[in-house]
Image (cartoon, rainbow, N blue to C red):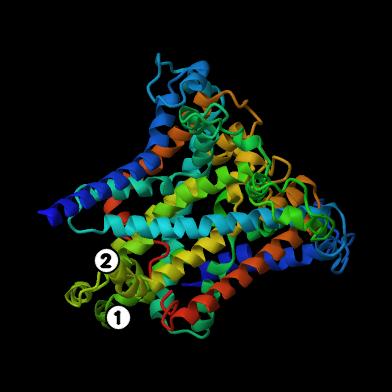
Amino acid sequence: MTAPVIVLLLVFLVAPIVMAAWVSLSNWNGIGSPFASDVSSVGLKNYQALLTDPGLPQQQLGESLRNNLYYVIFVVPVQTALALGLALAVSRKRLSGRGFFRTAYYFPSITSSVAVSVIFLYIFGSTGVVNAIISSLGAHGPNWFDDPSGVLQLLYSGLGVTQAPAALANHGFLGLPWWQWLAGPSVAMIALIVLAIWTTSGTFMLIFLPAIYAIPAELEEAAIMDGANTWQRFWRVTFPMLKPALFLVLTLGLIGTWQVFDQVYLISQGNPAGTTLTPAYLSYLTSFGNQQWGQGAAIAFILFAIIVVFTVLQRLVLKDRGATAGDRA
Amino acid sequence: MNRRMRKLAKRALLYLVLAIFAVIYIYPFLLSIGTAFKTDPDAMAQPLNPIPSHWVLTAFSELEQQDFLRWLANSMIVAVFVTAGRLLFDSMAGYALARLRFRGRGAVFSAIIAVMAVPSVVLLIPKFLVLKQLDIYNSYPGLIIPLMTDAAGVFIMRQFFLSVHPSIEEAAKIDGAGVFRIYWSVVLPMARPALMTLTILSFQGSWNDFSDILVAHQSPSLDTLTTGVGRLVSGQLGAATQYPLELAAAMAMTIPVAIVFFVFQKYIMRGGGGAVKE
């Protein structure tokens, strides 16, 4: 009875991956079958163009990795902390309106990425709610989706560093000077970061909730008897018990943020000035847009490798901190 | 006395913080609903006020001209077939993996777990390649078949069947029922709670799916709500100033998932997020 599923999974998951692996090593241009006789192997050329040969493909990949790295660094900790905080708050037994608060926080999670993108285009528009609130506070909001300046670079210039130091401007990695790597997420990317946190924190709150309820009440009572204050109780009792859930949330968060695609396609298309370009969108653009299928598939595999590395790293780090972490996840 | 005051103040602060967050999560939706009934200039001039200065239905009549009903029909076709397919295939596979003894069962299960770990965005190009190869690109089967089974659903069903005691099935076996018969008339009726979870997840997932639909078709007549509204938003059909139109589309496409959510809220909010149940 597993046969239909195995066939479907084979046809739509395993075979595709094998085919894409072949395409990433070939010069297929999207016309006809990738297995036709006029398609030939180019070895690792597609990967070299992206990783080692100076040029536009390498620079774009560098940019997309920088953008996505900042996206991950900003989104994952905030969404995890917020989800945990909300879950702790709404799990209190004597809280009236618990159901309402839970529903409110979870509702963005059920909405499609398309609807959420439309909402954010509106509220972060130049005359949108966010800027209306900022100007009511007496400041002037940016043109969110048109502003490519990096927020860290704005910080540096606030500290008086307006010119890139020569050492950082002349050397770099993946076709991008170090100064550009250190620019931070652009103002436009910040809007996408807020969008991600807003939509996912409710989902992750729902993962923390059963874990919180599973903590035996006696444990908490014993800690109170021993004279532990709220802060100590959280770090010594609650937090260790939540490690498996935390591990799950971090893993899902990392995997999710490294493949941000829908919002970029719908809201920014990588603009302004390539500061919201992400590997997932670049892969799509290179293959479906520019018909360079070999290179597009190669980007997809590079992204896959990055996700695997990050997941393994995170596993190692969390394992060190507590032997039981992750065992259940 | 002092202690009680402090406790009260702490409580008030908690409610205040929770309320502020509730506003942050809910107000954008209220604003969007209100703006859908505004005129274009009104939407630009009054971004903070969800109540239109005068109510108009321009956005909705314009939506109708944009093929919205066709997108709606396509979304329904995809969601219904995908959900039905997942209920059948995932439960069959889950049952086999939980109960039947066959060679390579462990290997199949590990393979399904491995598949769950492959990021879906990485599979966009591969999916397109297979659809082309099978000659179902740009067709309804191309939109539906790749989504008709999912590793996470198989996993949920397997976990459920493992939690059910096999005694009833054994009784049916003694009575001479075959494997498929036992599955169909004994096991499936018992599995209602898990099938319910799977239905909610599948419907929500396929209704909201954007990227898989995007790479499976080309012609606008196959657009679902997500890709159709997506086209509208990313500037291929409309300009940035048409906020009421875009928000009307966004809110209208949210209604079905919102209904499912409110009807089955108890199932969903029971926790675990369904797909990631431990």
Residue at which label 1 appears: B173
Label 1: state its secondary structure: helix
Judging depth in this view, the residue of B73 and B251 nearest the camera is: B251
Please name the residue that numbered disc 2 is placed on.
Answer: A230
Measured as percent of width and height from the top left, residue A45 is found at 87, 65
Residue placed most toward the observer, A25 or B68: A25
- Alpha-carbon span between mark 1 and mark 2: 56 Å
* Position in image of residue A111 (x %, y %): 44, 44
Left or right of A238 in this view: B115: right
Residue A32: tell me if it is visible.
Answer: no
Residue drawn at x 37%, y 49% as measured from the top left: A106
Q: Position of residue A315 (x, y in %)?
A: 53, 76
B56, B21: nearer the viewer: B21
Residue extending furthest toward the left: B1
**The C terminus of chain A: image quadrant:** bottom left
Dot 2 falls on which chain?
A: A
Q: In this view, does B61 lie to the left or right of B51?
A: right
The residue under label 2 is which amino acid type? Answer: Thr
- Letter of the chain that mark 1 sits on in the rendering: B
Pointer 1 and pointer 2: residues touching (CB < 8 Å)?
A: no
Q: Can residue B87 be seen in this view?
A: yes
Rendering quarter of residue B189: bottom left
